[in-house]
Image: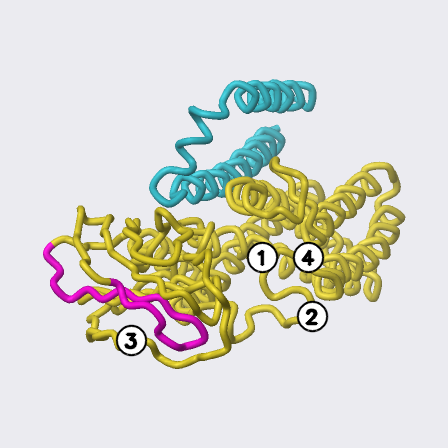
Chain colours: A cyan, B yellow
Amino acid sequence: MIKKTTLLLLSFIAFISNVSLAQDNAIEQTFHESGKINVVVAVVMVIFIGIIFYLIKLEKKISKLEKNSDK
Amino acid sequence: MNSIKKHWWKALAVVLLLYTFAFSFLVPLSSTIKSASPSSLEVGKNAVVLIGYNTEFEADENISISLEYDHKTLVCGTEIKQINANQISVNFNIPDSLPSKILHLRMSTSNFSSFSPELIKAFGITENQDTSNLCIVNAYNSSADILDIPNRLQLNETIRNLMFHVPMWFTMMVILFISFFYSIKYLNTFDIKYDIIAREAVNIGLLFAALGLITGSIWAKFTWSEHTDLFTTKGWWVNDVKLNGAAITTLIYVAYRILRNSLQEEHQKAKISAVYNIFAFVLMIVFLMILPRITDSLHPGNGGNPAFGKYDLDSTLRMVFYPAVIGWILLGIWMLSLKKRFFNLENKLEND
C-alpha cells in the first residue's frame, strides 16, 4: 500500500517537473490571463482534493472495521 | 429537536462555507487602472493609453483623469477618448517643474473612482517644493458598486485566495491546539481515549498544513516570486520567514507521527508522544506567530505589526474573511469528530 502511494507520488512529481520544464509558455500563461483567476481555481481544487483524500482514507478504515466486525 | 442541538454547528459550518464560496466567486474585483503606456512621460504633450481592469469606459461621458502628488492635483488629462471597454487614451501636458518625478494617477468615472499610486513617471522635469493645485478636476460623483473586492497590484484576482489559503492555517492552529489540550489531559488522567484524540488531531492538522503549504506555494509562484526583487528564487518557494517556519512546523509534526510509530507499548507511546506534542505546539507558536513578526516577512501583518491591522484588510473582505475562518475551523473539527467516533467504535469492538 505504502509502496503504491509512494510510487504514485513520485510519478506525479516527475510529471509535474516535466511539465514545468516544458511549459513556460503554455500552462504558466493560462495562470496569468484574466487577472490570474486560475490561481484561485488551482488553490480551490487543491483543497477539494485534500478533503477527498481524507474521505478516501476514512472510508478505507471503515471498510476494514466492517470486515473485522463480521468475523 | 435533539439532533438540532447536537448538529447545529455542522449546519453552521456548511452555511458559512457556502457564504464564503458564493461571496468569493460572485463579488467582482473593483475597477482599476492596470497600466499606462507609455508610463514615463516627458515635458510637453504626451498621449497616453490607460488600460483598465473591469472597467466600462464605453458610453461614459463623465470621465476625469488627473495626475497628482501629495494630495495636490498637478496635471489634468485632456482630450479623453474611449477606445474600448478597457482602454482609454488621454493627453497630459507636463510642465517644466513639478514637486516629484513619480506621479499618482486619479480617475473618476460615473461607475468608479480609482487611485493608482506611482503609475506614471515624468522625466526631464526639475523638482520644486511648490505644492499647490495646478489645475482643478471635475470630480464626478461615481455610483460605485456596493460590493467589490479590492484590486491590488500583482495580486489581482488571487486576493480571493484569502478565503481559502489563510483559513487552512487558522484551522491547523485550532486543531493542533485541541491536540495540545488533549495531550495535557492525557498526562493528567492517563486515559487512552484522550491520547487517541490528540493523535488524530495531529493527523488532521497535518492535512491542513499540507493544504496550506501547497496552496501557498501556488499563490506565491504567480505573485511574489515574479515580482519581488528582494528574493532571488523565482520558483514555487520564496525564501520568506513565515514559509520556512510553516515548513519546519510541518516537519515537527511529521516527526511526532514517526515518534509514535517507533514505540511499541501503548502507554509508553502515549506518554512520550504527549510530552513531545506539548513541545511541538510551543514551537509552532514560535515559528508561525513570533519569529515572522520579529523579522520582515512578505506576509501581511508581519514585521512588527499585529496581523489584520486596520490597513491590512479591506472592510468588504472582512465581511467574508471572518465567516470563512469560522466555517473552515468548524469543518476541521467536524473531520476530527468523525475520526474520534471511528476510533471509539473500534476500541469498543476490540474490547467486546
Dot 1 and dot 4 residues touching (CB under 8 Å): no
Write the start and end of the magenta stretch as one range: B59-77
Left-right relation of B85 to B262: left
Looking at the picture, which amino acid does disc 1 mark? Thr
User: Total number of numbered labels?
Assistant: 4
User: Where residue B328 appears, x then y in whole percent?
Assistant: 50, 56
Name the residue located 29 percent from the left edge and 58 percent from the top edge. Answer: B31
Position in image of residue B320 (x %, y %):
40, 64
Could you confirm whether marks 4 and 2 are on the same chain? yes
| Residue at which label 3 appears | B135
Mark found first going from the N terminus, 2 or 1: 1
Question: For mark 1, what is the residue?
Answer: B171
Taking depth in this image into account, of B67 and B351 the one nearest to the observer is B67
Looking at the rendered image, the disc whose residue lies closer to the viewer, 1 or 3, is 3
Mark closer to the chain start, 4 or 3: 3
Mark 1–mark 4 Cα distance, whole angstroms, equals: 8 Å
Type of amino acid under label 2: Gly
Chain of the residue on which disc 4 is drawn: B
For the residues tagged 1 and 3, is the chain the same?
A: yes
Tell me if label 2 and label 1 are in contact, CB under 8 Å.
no
* Residue under numbered circle 2: B304
Question: Do callouts 1 and 4 point to residues on the same chain?
Answer: yes
